Each structure stands twice: as structure tokens, then as C-alpha cells.
Image (spheres, rainbow, N blue to C red):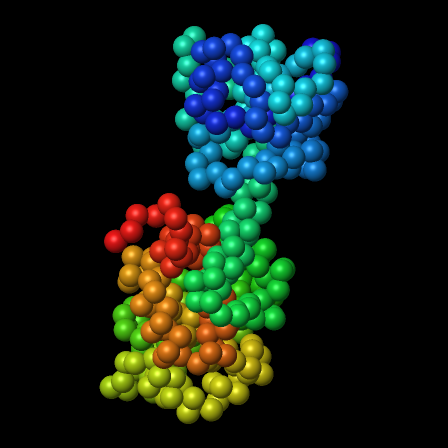
Amino acid sequence: MDKGYTTLCLFRKDDVIDFFKNGKAFLHCPVLSETMTVEEIAEDAKNCDKLFDKANPIDYSIYYFILQFVSDKKKDKSAMVEIEELRGIFPLDNESYRIGLHLSPEIRLEKPIFQQAFYNFQKSKLLESSRSGVENIARIFDIEIKLPKKFNKKDQEALVDAFYSGTPINGEHSIWYYLLGYSRRLPYPKDNRGLFIDILHIFYNFTTKAEINKDLSQSNAGQAIMGSNYTSYKELLGILSNQINFIKQSQKKADKYYWRIAPLYLCLRLYVERNNGLITKEMVESIKKNYEKEDLKYALALLGFTLGQDNTYKSVYINSNLPFLQKD
């Protein structure tokens, strides 16, 4: 076993190729330089997290690798490394390990022992993106918005974890966790009536603490919605407001304003989806004009959390007078 300092650094695939070709490179990202072995470092969660410090979200694990170097002196983030110091190339996860890294002459990839640290990083970035989405929506609409109080940090983290790991939406969580985690599986109408049936289904999932495959269009409230000739949000909200039993149950078990905020959130989400994911200035003016400000405060925040940074930054740009954008 080599004696000295073990240095680990996150490299882009292209930078790995350049380093392999040129035999040397400067480190331009956070590094770990310890007297421990690479295996000991991999078992230390706090140390592993430092490898991804200040890194942007990673869309595809196959484009990044962790490189291990061994040297007599401790290296910092501006140090030069040379090919003779290279001891191992670690893929971030099993998928990247399977695909490999093709260089000439051929190299040996180590097993992805930093996979858990990579997963933790990805989930933290996904949560950060969701919260940035809330900030972006507030900026786009130029109004004060906030997430419902019951949609707390625990629920937010659990929702992100479920999305990232592909696990079912279930357990002891708020109605907002079930709302944002909901995916329609039954053939409800594609117009606004379907969205109002969705909020019945979401409430049912919430009360049973699991995703249930039950047709809520046949419930009393569902039949009232389905039997209506109306399809506008305001008209359907009026019909729902007359479903006293549902309103009382949702206010008692879920949230006082769930029955108002949830359908508005779903309508806004669909509105954005149908506009190729963009929120134009015209849409902003129309939404602010046609919906209750108090309902919008929460529905827009939930929309921002759902869309995240990736799906709101373009809308921020087109609603801002940024000097680098091309003028019409």
C-alpha cells in the first residue's frame, strides 16, 4: 500500500481524457487530501460530502469520475497532479461503472464505492433546485408567496427522496406531500373536471397513507363534478364548495384550504405544461387577474417547488430585462 497523502477530486469526463493525454493537470475543484486510505475515506460520510462541495447538479453520472492520487505532500485545490500519482478512477454509480471509460491504453475502473455519497449529493441538489423554483416563481410573478406551513422540511426531504429513489408515495405525511407526489393512473377527464377529481383522489390517498387505485369519479363529490356541464376552474370550484362532507373532512384531516389551493395548483401546472413549460408575461398578467391572491400565494409556491430551477430559469429570463438576451 502506498504511503503518503491520498487525494481525491471530482473530474469531468473530458478533463479525465485531457489529463490522460497530457499527463498532468491542475485541480480546480474541492479536494480531499488525507493520510487515510481511499476505503477509509469512502466510509466517512462527512468527508465524502466534501468531494461534491460547490459542484453543480450532475445530470448524468457517466460524465464524471472521482480520481485518486497518492503523493508525499498534501495537495490543495490549486495543486498540480501528474499521471504517475494516479492510483484509481472511481465511477459515481453502478450505471457509470457498467458503461465504463474507454481510453487507450485501456484503464481499470474501480468499483463505485462513493455511490452513496453521490446519491446524497443528488438528493440535496434536487431539494435545493425545488426551493430555488419557489424563489424563481416569486420573482416571475412579483408577489409574496410561501409554502403551506404543514409542508415542512421533513415532508420536502421525503418527497425528494421518493422521487429520486422511485419509491411509492406513502406514510405519515401532510396532504401537500401527497399532492406534489401524485401521478394520475386512472382515466379521469382531460379537462378541468379531471383535475378536481384528482384532488378527491389525492385526499383519499392521504387518508389511507398510500397510493390507492380507486375511481373517485364515482364518489358523491366526484359524481357532482362529472355531472356538471361546466369545465372552468371557478365554476367547478363553486360545485366543489357545495360538497359539504368533503369540505369538512378535508379541513379536519388535511388542511383548511386544501380544497381551494390544490385545484388551483393543478390548473396552474397544466397551464404551464401546455405552454411548453414557459411562463410568459401575458400568462403572469392573466393569472394574477383571474385568481384569488390568497390562494395564489400558496398554489404558486407549490408550483415553484414542483418545477424547480431547471423548469423555471427560462421563464425568469424571459420576464427579465437581462442585457445579454436577444431583443425582439
Residue 209: % across, % down: 54, 68
Side of 41 relative to 83 (left or right): right
Residue 98 visible somewhere in the drawing: no
Query: In this rendering, is residue 254 above or below 122?
Result: below
Identify the residue shown where x is 66% and y is 14%: 70
Q: Quadrant of the N terminus?
A: top right
Residue 183 visible somewhere in the drawing: yes
Question: 228 or 289: nearer the eye?
Answer: 289
Q: Quarter of the image holding residue 62?
A: top left
Question: 238 or 129: nearer the eye?
Answer: 129
Identify the residue shown where x is 47% and y is 91%: 244
Side of 165 relative to 1 (left or right): left
Q: Quarter of the image holding residue 272?
A: bottom left
Identify the residue shown where x is 54% and y is 46%: 125
Question: 209 or 248: nearer the eye?
Answer: 248
Residue 164: % across, % down: 50, 48
Q: Quarter of the image holding residue 99?
A: top left
Identify the residue shown where x is 35% and y is 72%: 285
Residue 308: % across, % down: 46, 55
Query: In this rendering, is residue 93 above or below 209?
Result: above
